[in-house]
Amino acid sequence: MNESSGQPRALAPDVRVWDPLLRLAHWSFPLLIAAMWWTAENSKWALHRRMGLALFGILALRVLWGFLGPETARFSQFVKAPGKVLAYLRGDRSVGPQIGHSPLGGWSTIALIGAMMLQVGMGLFAGDPYDGMTGPLNPLVGVMTADTITELHETFFWVLVAMIALHLAAITFYAVKGDDLLSPMVGGARPPMAQVAGIGPTPWARAALAVGLAAGLALWVTYGAPPLT
């Protein structure tokens, strides 16, 4: 008689997909964008400026983490050539990574990061020095240029909102199909996958380097990007 009969089979461990630093940055984006909309609508400009600089720092961190982070955080893992994106859309799932962003999801991530960087970048130069709060880099451009940037900053926000809505619609679409993309971004792991080990431990030394560089860049911009010499 087999002695192991009747013993419960050990469950395979969940697969770690997203590291804590990436998840922290990811959830900071919607919270800060919503809060910045509220501060703008209620003329809380000092708070709006501080939140904008915080968003700038987190975006800088996400870009750095795209080169220093673990597998699923790296741009090289999920930014694929257009031909592979088209193949993925035609149903060829072999062109994408086993975990992390799909080829299509990778480009949508790049588009969202780029849109947020553009919006924040315009905010750094926006404002009227004769009528309230300005961005920290406003003195580097003329008044007329700043006025144009300010108008674009206000208009482009709704483009960003539309992109976020499209992103949420895609998450909902996959959820209806039975592919839960939300839970792994909350907890960091997904149910077991055959022959997939996950991303391994978080490289905390590189994380500290990325946080330090991003914080230093945000602080430098806060003071108006003074010459480093």
Image (tube, rainbow, N blue to C red):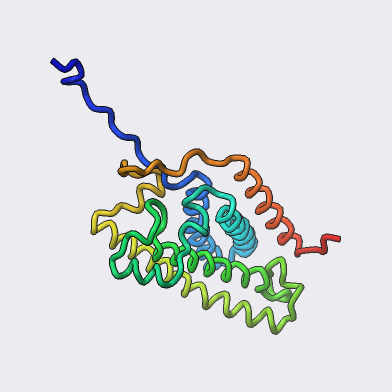
Depth check: give the residue in front, 41 or 165.
165
Determine which quarter of the picture holds residue 51: bottom right
Residue in front for this viewpoint, 197 or 24: 197
Residue pushed farthest left?
1
Q: Is residue 193 left or right of residue 214?
A: left
Residue depicted at x 68% and y 48%: 212
Query: Among all residues in the image, which is located at the extreme bottom?
Result: 144
Which residue appears farthest toward the front when viewing the image? 1
Relative image position of residue 198 (x, y in whole percent): 41, 43
| Quadrant of residue 141 within the rendered picture | bottom right
Task: Count how many numbered circles sit on residues in the image.
Answer: 0
Instruction: Give the residue drawn at x 28%, y 28%.
Output: 10
In the picture, measured across the screen, residue 176 lies left or right of residue 213, that is left
* Residue 154 picture quarter: bottom right
The answer to whether 88 is drawn above or below residue 71 in the figure is below
Please tell me whether residue 123 is drawn above or below residue 35 in the rendered image.
below
- Residue found at x 71% / y 60%: 222
User: Percent from the top left, x then y, of residue 18?
Assistant: 45, 47
Looking at the image, residue 127 lies above or below residue 219: below
Q: Nearer the viewer, residue 176 or 146?
A: 176
> Quadrant of the image for the N terminus?
top left
| Farthest-out residue, right | 229
Can you give x and y, in whole percent of width and height, for residue 194 in the image?
A: 30, 43
Q: Position of residue 166 (x, y in %)?
A: 37, 68
The C terminus, quarter of image: bottom right
| Residue positioned 28% across, 56% down in the render | 175
